[in-house]
Amino acid sequence: MTELIEHNIFLVLFLPVWVCLFILVNHFVKFTDTKKLTYFFTLFSTTVGLIFSSFLLYSTLFPVQRTIENSLLWFQYGNLSVYFGVFIDNISAIFLFILMCVSLAVHIFSYDYMKDDEDFHKYFFYLNFFNFSMSALLVSSNLIQTYIFWELVGVASYLLIGFWYKRADVSLAAKKVFWINRIGDFTFLLALITLIYYSVSYLQSFPQGEILAFTNLDAITFNLQALMSETTFVSILLLLALSAFVKSAQFPFQTWLVDAMKAPTPVSALIHSATMVCAGLFLILRLYPMFMASEFILHLIFIVGLFTAIFCALFALPQRNIKKMLAYSTSSQLGLMFFALGALSPTAAIFYMCAHAFAKSSLFLTTGYVSKLYGDELNMNKLGGVRYNKFLLALYWFIASVSLSGMAFIGRNAKEAIYGSFFNPSSYLTLSLLVLVSFLTTVYLFRSYLKIFEFESNLSMKYMSSYSMTFGILGVVLLSLCGGAIINNELLKAITPQNFFFTEYHDLGLALILIAAALIGISVAFITVKIKPKRNIIPRFIVKFFYRGAYIDSIFKFIGSILFISVCKVLKFIDEYIFDGCVKLISFISVKLSHLVKKLQNGNFQTYIAYAVFSAGLILYLAFQIYSYIAKEL
Amino acid sequence: MLSFQSLIFLIFAPLIASLIILCPLFPSTDTAVRRFSKWFSVCHFLYAITFLLLFQSQNPVLVLEDELKLFSLHWIDTLGISATFSMDSLSLALVLLTTFIFFIAFVMSKRTIKKDFKIYYSLMFLLEMCILGIFCAKDLFIFFLLWELELVPMYFLISKWGSVNAKASAMKFLLYTFFGSIFILLGIFTIYFYSYSISGVLTSNMDMLITDSNLYPPQIIYFAFICFLIGFGVKLPIVPLHTWLADAHSDAPTPVSIVLAAILLKTGAYGLLRFNLSLFPDIFLTLAPALMFFAAVNCIYASSLAVVQKDIKRLIAFSSISQMGIFLIGLFSVNYIGLSGAVFQLISHAIIAAGLFTVAGILYSIYSTRDIDYIHNHLKNSPLFMFVSIPIILAAVGVPLFSGFIAEFLSFVGGMTSDFGITLPKILTSISIFTIVLSSAYILKLFHSCFFGVRDLNFTRDISGHRLNVLIIISVIVLFFGIFPNFLSDIYMPFIDTTVDMLGVQ
Amino acid sequence: MNFFYDILIYNPQELVLSFFIITGLLLSLFNNERLNKFAYLFALFGIITAILSTLSINITTGMGHGNSFTSSNLFSVVSKTLILFSALLIIILSRKIISEYSKKAFEFVTLIFSGVLGACCLVISNDFLTAFVSLEMLSVSGYLLVGFTKTQRAKEASIKYLIQSCFASALLLFGVSYIYGLSGSIDFYSVSDFCFSLSPTFFYPALGLLTIMGIMFKLGCVPFTNWIPDIYEGASYPVGAFISLVPKIAGFAFLVRILAFIFPHMPIATLALQIIAVISVIYGVFGAISQTNIKRLWGYSSIIQSGFILCAVSFMTVYSLSSVLFYLGVYIFMNLGVWCASYQFNINTGSDLIADNEGLYKKRPYFSIAYTICLISLAGLPLTAGFLAKIYLFSSIIKSGLEYFSLLFILLLLSLGAIFAYFNVIKNIFVSSSKLLSFPFKYTTADMLLYFCAFLTIVLCLIPNSFIKISQIVSFYIN
C-alpha cells in the first residue's frame, strides 16, 4: 500500500491542477455550462486528497516515524542546483491532513453559497489553485521550493480576496493584503539567498545534491553555523521568523488578516482561519532544528506569540463585525501556537493548530450561513434570534466556541497540552497570562453567540435551507467535537519530532482552572450583552483604541501611502528637474546661443569687417598663448 | 549546413522585404501590406528556428565566420574594415527574440496604425534588419554603422505615428542616443588605433583586435572601457542617462514602443556583454563591484519612480528600467549563475514588456488616453481581457512559476555569490532584492486602477481576435519558460560557458 | 616658346577653358536669339572637353615638373578634376537660369568658365603672384555671378561679396609682401627653402598666419563667416551652389599646398587652424539651429562642413589629407543634392522657407525620400557617404595622436547640434498636414540631379573601397 502511495505522489499532488485546467477549458469551450460538473470535479479531487493524506499520515507515523522523499532536478546553473520534489515527514503529513479535511468541508459548503454568483467557475478555479499550492508548500523538499509555493499561496489568497473585484473596497483590500504579504516574501527571499550563498560557495563538501534540502537539515544547520558568524546566523533566523509572523498575521501584521475578511466567507474559512495562516507555523516547525540553535530567536517567538495572543484577544472584544472579530481571534490563537513553539513544545502547537482549525473553520462557515440568511449582514448588533429558526447553527456555534475556549472536547486537551508545561510554581506569571487569554477568548466568543443567536432582531430572515451548507459545517463540527478521539495521545507521541518527548498531561487542578476561567468568561459575556450597564466600565477611548486595532492599520496606511508616495514624489521631482533638467538646460542654452549668432548677422556691412578684424586678432592671440604654453611644457 | 548565404540572408531578409513593400507596384492597402509583413515575419521566425535546430545538432560553440560577399569583399581594404557577421549562441538567442517580438509588433499594429502603411512597415523592417545586424556584427565599424542606422527609422516611427508631442520626444530620443554613440565611437577609435600601434595590422575585426589590458597603458584601456560603458549605458538606461526612455515610450505608438522596450534596450545590454565583458575581461572584473552600485540604484530608483507615474506607458517604461537593473546585478556579479540569470532576464523581460505594452495599447485604444486616473476601467463585461492579462501582470511582479521569477532569482543569487572578497556587492544585492516589493506596488497600482474600480462603463466590449491571441501567446510562453527554464537557457548556455572560462571565474 | 608648350602639355584644362571663355565672349557679342539657345549646349560641350582633356596628361612622367609659374602634380590634377566635375553638375543645374535670361546666356556661361579657370590656376599655381591673380579671377567672376539675377537682394549681396573679398585679399597681400621681404622671393620652392633654414621665431609665423587668414575667406571659416549667409540668400540657387562648391575645393587645395610648402614644421599653424575650425563649426551650428530661410541654412551648413574639413587639413598627414579629399568628393554630392532639392522646391512653390515643406511626402514621396537621404548624409547618419566620410575624417584626427581626444569630442558634440539643425528640415517633410502648397509638376534638371546625387551618396557608402584607395595614393604627391 505504501509503495502505491509513494509512486503516484506527484499524480495526487497535481490533481487540483488538472481540475483547474479542466475548469479553464470548460469555461472557454463552454462544453457544459452546468455548475455541477466543476463542483463534482473539485469534490472528487479533495476527497481523493483527504483519503490519500490520511493514508500518508498513517504510513509516515506508524509503525515507526519515517519520511517519504522523492525529488527530481528542476534546473541547474553552475553549482546552484534547484530540485522539485516531495519530502513528507510527520509534520507535513498532519498539516496536509488538516488542510484536506477543512478544504473538503469548505468545498461542500461553498456550492450553495456561490450558486447564484456568475463567477462560479472562476471561484472553484481559484480554490483548486490554492489547494494545489498549499499542499505543494506542505510537501516541498527544499527551502527554495517552499519559498516558491509560499509566494504562490500569497497570490492565490490575493486572487480569492479580490474575487468580487467589482467593489472598490474589495480591490483596495486585495492590493493591500498582497503588498504586506510581499514584505514577508522579501524577508524570506533575502534569508533564502544568503543561505544559498553560504551553501553554494562554501559547502563544497556537499555532493552536488539538493541545496538546503530538508532531508539533511541537521547537518546543514551544523555546517552553516560553523561557517557563518553568529550575527549573520541570527539575522537569517530573524528574517525567517519575520516572514512567518507576516504570513501568520502576528502582532504588527495582523491588519492584513482583518482586511482579508472582504473575501467570500468560505474562502476566509479555508484560507484565513485554518490553512494559509498556519503556513508561518509550518515554516518554523519545518526549520525547527535551525531555530533551536539560537536562544534569542526562540525567546522572540515566545514573546511575540504571547503578546499577539493577549492583544489580539483584546482587539477582538469590541468588534461589531463577526468576521473581523473572528480574524482577530485567529491571530490571537496563532499567537498561542507561536508561544508554544517558543516554549519548546512543538507537539502542543501542532495539537492546538488542529483543534483551532476545526473550531475556527466551523465558526466561519456558520457566519457564512447566517450572513446568507440575513442578506450578507455581518453586524452582530443587528443580528439576533437565529436560534429560534436555525437551532442547528446555534448548536454548531456553541460547540465550536466551547471547544475553542478550552472547556471541553478537543480544545481542552489542546489547551492543557500547551498550559501543562507552565503549571508549576516557577512560571505562574505566564500561566496567569495564558488563563487571561482563554478567559478573553470565551468572553468574545460567547458575547457573539448571545448577540447573534439569543435575542430578537428586527431583520427579516430569508427562509432558506441548504443541505450542502449544513453538511459542510457538520463535518468540521463533528471533527472538533470528537477530534480528541482521532488525535489522541498515541498520534501525538508519533508526531513529536525526534529529540522531543510528549507527556500527555492530565492534571485536575489545571482542568479546573480552565473550566473556571471559561465559566467566568461566559457570565461576563452574559452580563455585558443582556444587562446593558448604564455607565460603561471601560473608558470610551480605550474601547475605541481596541476597536481600531491599536491604530496599526492607519499606521500601515500612513507608511504605505503617505510616507512612501511622498518619497517617490521627491524622487520624481529630482528625476524631472535634475536629470531631465540638464538635458532641457542644454537645449535651452543652445537655442539662446543661436539667437545670439543671428544678431551677429545684422546685415550692415561695417560690423562684418569689424567682426573679421576682431576674430582674426583673437585667433592669433589664442594661438600664441596656447603655443607658448605647449612649448613651455615640452 | 549553415552555409554563408543563410546567415547573410537571415540578417538582410527584412531589408529585402522593406524594399519590396516600398516599391510602387506593391498594393498600398492596409490589409495587404500588414498581411504580407505578418506572414513574412512568421517565415523569418521559422527560418531563425532552423538555425536553432542546426545549432543544437552541430557542435555547441559554432562560430560562423562569414565574410559578407555582398560588398566588395572588404568594405574598406585600406582601413582593414570588412563587413563580417557571425553568430554565436548569445546572438542566436537574441535573434530569435527579435524575430518573435517583431511578429508581435506587426500583429499589434492592426488598428493602431491608421495612415501611410507602406512607409511604416518598410521602416519597421529596416529597423529589424539593423537590430539583427547589431546582434551578429563582428566588425567594430559595421556594429557602429548599424547602431546609428537604427536611430533613423526609430526617429521617423516615433515622430510620424506617435501621439501629440511625438516630434519633440523623437528628436530627444535621436539626440540622446546619438550622444551615447559618440562615446562608443571614441571607444572604437581607441581600440582600433591602439591595437594597430601594437600589432601593426590595421583591422577592426573583433576577434583579431588585441585588447588584453597588460599591453595597453592603463589610462587608455580604462578610458575605452568607460566610453563603452557610458555609450551602452545610455541605450540600456542606466539611471543618470535614462530620461529619454520615458518620453520616447509615452509618445510612441504601441507596436513601436513594444519594439523599443523589448529589443532596443537589449542592444545596449548586448553591447555591454560583447564589448565590456568579452573584450576587456579583467577590467570588467576589477570594476564590477563598483558598477554594482549602478545596478542597485537602477532597481530601486526606477521602481520607486514608477509608483508615482500618472501615464501608463511611462509607468511601464520605468518598470523596464528597474528590470534592466536586475540584469545589471546579474551581469556585474560576473559568475556562472549571475550571467545566466542576466541573459535569462534579457529574454524574459522582453516578452513581459511586450505583453505589458500590448495591454497598455489595448487600454489606449479603448479609452484613447493614457492617464491612469481617468481609465478606472470597470471591466464588467470584459473579464476575459482581465483574465488573460493576469499572467503577464504576475510575471512582471516576479511571481514564481513565471519566467520573471527565474531571472530575478538567478540574478540575485549570482549577485549574492559574487566573490570579490568585499561585502559591498552583497549589501547592494540585498538592497535591490527590495525591488520585488516595489515592483508589486506599481504593477498592482497599474492593474487595479485599470481593471478594478468604480466608474461603470457600459460599452466596453471584451477584446477578441488578434489582440487576444497575442496576449494568450505571451502568457503561455511566460508560463512555459517559468516552469521549464532549461528550454530557454540551453540556447545561450555555450556563450556563458566560454565567457566564464575566459574570465576564469567560478 | 617652351613656356607655352609646358602649359599645354601639363595643364590642358586651363587651355581648353580659356579657349571657351574667348569664344563665349565673342558669341555673346552677336546677341541674337537663336544663337543664345545654344548657350547651354556650348557650356556643356566646353566643360566636358575640359574634363576629357585631363586624360591627355600621362600621369607617370609629367608629375613633379614645375616651372616658375605652375607645377602639375597628382594632387592638383585630382582637385582640378573635382572642380571641373562640380562645375559640370552646376551647369546642368543652371539650365533653367540660362534659358530664362537667354539674352545674357553666354555671359553667364563665360562667367562660370572664368571662375572655374581661376580655381584651376589657383590649384596649380607655384608662386604667390599666379595664386593671387587666379584668386582674384575666381572672386570677380563670383561677384558678377551673384549679381546676375539683378534683384535687389542680389545686387546688395554682390557688393558685399566684393568688399569683403577685397579686404581678405588685402590681408593676403600684406602677408605675402612680408614673406617676400623676408625670403626675397615669392616662389613657393625658394620660400620653403628659406623657411626650412629659419628657426621658428615669433615674427615669421605671424606673417604666415596672415596669408592663411586671407585664404579663410574663400573657405568661409571664422574670420570671414559673416558674408556667407547674406550672399547665399542673395544669389540665385545655381550660383549659390557654385559658390559653395568651387571656391571651397580650390581654397582647400591651395591651403594644402601652402601648408605643405611654407609651414611644414610650424605647430603654431596647425594649432591656429584647429582653433579656427572649431570656432567656425560652433558658429555654423548655432547659426543653423534657429534658421527659417533654406538658403541661409545651406550657408551655415557649408560653414560647418568647411570647419570639419579644415580641422582634418590642419594635421597635414597623408592619412588626414586622403580623408579630406574623400570628404570633399562626398561633399560635392551631398551639398549639390540639397541645393537641387531646394531649388526644385523653390521653382515649384516659389518659397524658400523651411517651414513651407510641410507634408511634402504626401505630394512627392520619392522626391522627399531623396531629399532626406541627402540631408541625413550631411548630418552624418549611417548608410550615407556623409557618415562614412565623417568617420574617416574623425579617425584621421585620432590617428595623429591620442591626445586629440578632446578636440574630437568637441567636434562630435557639435555634430550633435548639426543633426538637430538638419532634422529641422526633415521634421516637417513627413508630417501629414493639410497645409499643403500647390505643387504643380514642373520637371527641371534639378529634379534629375537630386536623384543622381542621392543615389551616389548611397552607392559611395556601400562601395567606397576604390575611392578611398585613390585618395590615399593621391595624398602622397602634394608638391
Image (tube, grey):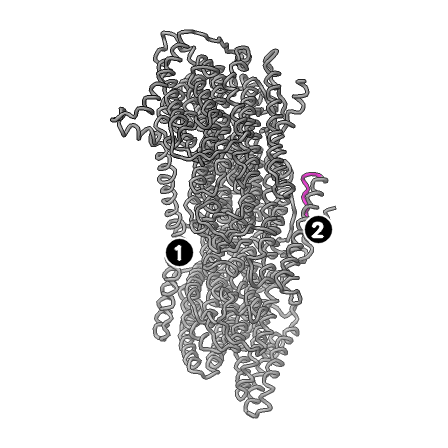
Report the residue marked by disc 2.
B6
Image: magenta residue range: B59-66
Judging depth in this view, the residue of C193 and C413 nearest the camera is C413
Does the stretch in magenta take in B63? yes
Res B472 → quadrant: top right
In x, y percent, where is residue C454?
Answer: 59, 67
Q: Is mark 2 on a helix, strand or loop?
A: helix
The amino acid type found where label 2 is placed reads Ser
Judging depth in this view, the residue of A369 and A324 nearest the camera is A369
Q: Gap between marks 2 and 1, in whole Å?
A: 46 Å
The amino acid type found where label 1 is placed reads Ile
Circle 2: is it few (<14), some (14-19), or many (20+) Cα within 10 Å?
some
Q: Which chain carries label 1?
A: A
Overall secondary structure of the magenta stretch? Answer: loop
In x, y percent, where is residue C404?
Answer: 47, 53
Q: Which chain carries label 2?
A: B
Report the residue marked by disc 1.
A586
Please identify the quadrant where the N terminus of chain A is shown.
top right
